[in-house]
Amino acid sequence: MSSRPEQPLTRREILRLSAAGVAGASLSGWFGLLAEQAARAAAPPSRLKSCVLLWMDGGPSQFDTFNPKIGSQFQGPAAR
């Protein structure tokens, strides 16, 4: 930008200032939305959620569940 006030603005400086003004005006609405989202995230949830994890060791392996083992004692009921 020009450092002396008596110098007129160039076209490049005018475009730079107007682009900054348009960008600032368009972003002003986003800052309000971001503040709302931050306030909503900081508030405690209306309903608490929980999760139960069951870690069961000792189940059948993939070979036992996908391999029918025809002719063994572990074979399932015969399809008729």
Image (cartoon, rainbow, N blue to C red):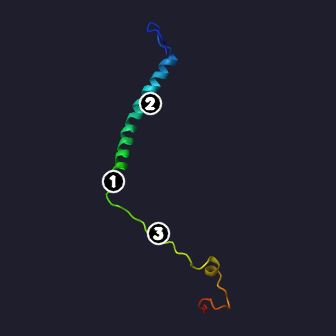
Element carrying mark 2: helix
Element carrying mark 3: loop
Residue 22 position, x and y percent, is 43, 28
* Up/down of 42 relative to 65, above or below: above
Q: Residue at x 47, y 69 (%)?
A: 53
- Of the image marks 3 and 2, the number of the one nearer the N terminus: 2
Between residues 29 and 50, which one lies in front from this camera angle?
50
- In the figure, residue 65 lies in which quadrant? bottom right
Amino acid type assigned to the residue bearing label 2 in the image: Ala
Q: Residue at x 55, y 75 (%)?
A: 57
Amino acid type assigned to the residue bearing label 1 in the image: Pro
- Of the image marks 1 and 2, the number of the one nearer the N terminus: 2
* Up/down of 77 relative to 62, above or below: below
* Up/down of 80 relative to 44, above or below: below
The residue to which callout 2 is attached is: 23
Q: CA distance from mark 1 to mark 2?
A: 34 Å
